Image (cartoon, grey):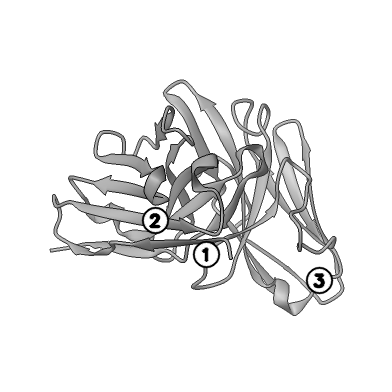
């Protein structure tokens, strides 16, 4: 079964750091681009970051640029999101999504909740 | 304020045809593919349409995407109660600060 499973969410104080992980299985992870998308409580979807299959290309939303770092380990079939200088407005469910190039974000994880609060 | 503009809500009765609009600009919809996602409360989004009008395997042909210029739309025919969900349009945006993927604000579809 093709699957993505996120982990690493939790409660963190403003200014703190958190590292999210996303484990892929059931497909050739190294062949796919990957993204992080978040959704604040009761709000819409917001794209966070993109990484190409070889990590040669990386993009970020302006709202997280300079604070978040996306990375991947193809040997471990894993995607990561290092989040620093967290703010209350970063509170959201974070999803990892497989990017089948022009065919869209076709596989999504179940999401992991990140709460930034004192 | 989302880069892509959708109506916040839409509604229809069972069997009816409903259309959800999505308005963008030359840097996103006007020059890139449009995607549509369906999301039920408490669950992850699901890809409903890609490359403007293509349906992933398993998506009923009641759902059809289209694009014209800097606008796109999702049509749902033969509306069913189980179609009640949030729908999001999306596209890559070729902004000056670098590529970004943008979503519409979402449309909550109610089947009355």
Q: Residue at x 42, y 27 (%)?
A: A56
**Residue position marked by numbered label 3 in the rendering:** B79
* Image quadrant in which you'd find residue A64: top left
Q: Residue at x 13, y 49 (%)?
A: A15
Q: Nearer the viewer, residue B72 or B45?
A: B45
Specify the quadrant that holds the C terminus of chain A.
bottom left
**Residue position marked by numbered label 2 in the rendering:** A22
* Image quadrant in which you'd find residue A12: bottom left
Q: CA distance from mark 1 to mark 2?
A: 14 Å
Q: Is residue A15 visible?
A: yes
> Is disc 2 placed on a helix, strand or loop?
strand
Q: Relative to residue B78, is residue B2 drawn left or right? A: left
Q: Find out whether the residues at labels 1 and 2 contact each other: C-beta distance under 8 Å.
A: no
**Residue position marked by numbered label 1 in the rendering:** B44
Please provide percent x and percent y for residue B15: 87, 74
Q: Nearer the viewer, residue A25 or B37?
A: A25
Please provide percent x and percent y for residue A25: 50, 59
Would you call the spot at circle 3 few (<14 residues within 10 Å), some (14-19), or many (20 or more)?
many
Please provide percent x and percent y for residue B80: 78, 75
Would you call the spot at circle 1 few (<14 residues within 10 Å), some (14-19), or many (20 or more)?
many
Q: CA distance from mark 1 to mark 3?
A: 22 Å
> Is disc 3 placed on a helix, strand or loop?
loop
């Amino acid at each position: 079964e093709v699957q993505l499973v996120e982990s690493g969410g939790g409660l963190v104080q403003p200014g703190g750091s958190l590292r999210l992980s996303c484990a892929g299985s059931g497909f050739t992870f190294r062949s796919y681009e990957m993204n992080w998308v978040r959704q604040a409580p009761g709000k819409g979807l917001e794209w966070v970051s993109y990484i190409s299959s070889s990590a040669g290309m990386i993009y970020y939303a302006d709202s997280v640029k300079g604070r978040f770092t996306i990375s991947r380990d193809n040997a471990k079939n894993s995607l990561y999101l290092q989040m620093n200088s967290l703010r209350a407005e970063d509170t959201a469910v974070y999803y990892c999504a497989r990017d089948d190039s022009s065919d869209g974000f076709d596989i999504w994880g179940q999401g992991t909740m990140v709460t930034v609060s004192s | 304020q989302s880069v892509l503009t959708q109506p916040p809500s839409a509604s229809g009765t069972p069997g009816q045809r409903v259309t959800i609009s999505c308005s963008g600009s030359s840097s996103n919809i006007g020059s890139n593919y449009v995607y549509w996602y369906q999301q039920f409360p408490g669950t992850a989004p699901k890809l409903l349409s890609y490359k403007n009008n293509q349906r992933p395997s398993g998506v009923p042909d009641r759902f059809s995407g289209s694009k014209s210029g800097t606008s796109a739309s999702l049509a749902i025919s033969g509306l069913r109660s189980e179609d009640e969900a949030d729908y999001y349009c999306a596209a890559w945006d070729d902004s000056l600060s670098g590529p970004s993927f943008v979503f519409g604000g979402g449309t909550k579809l109610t089947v009355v």
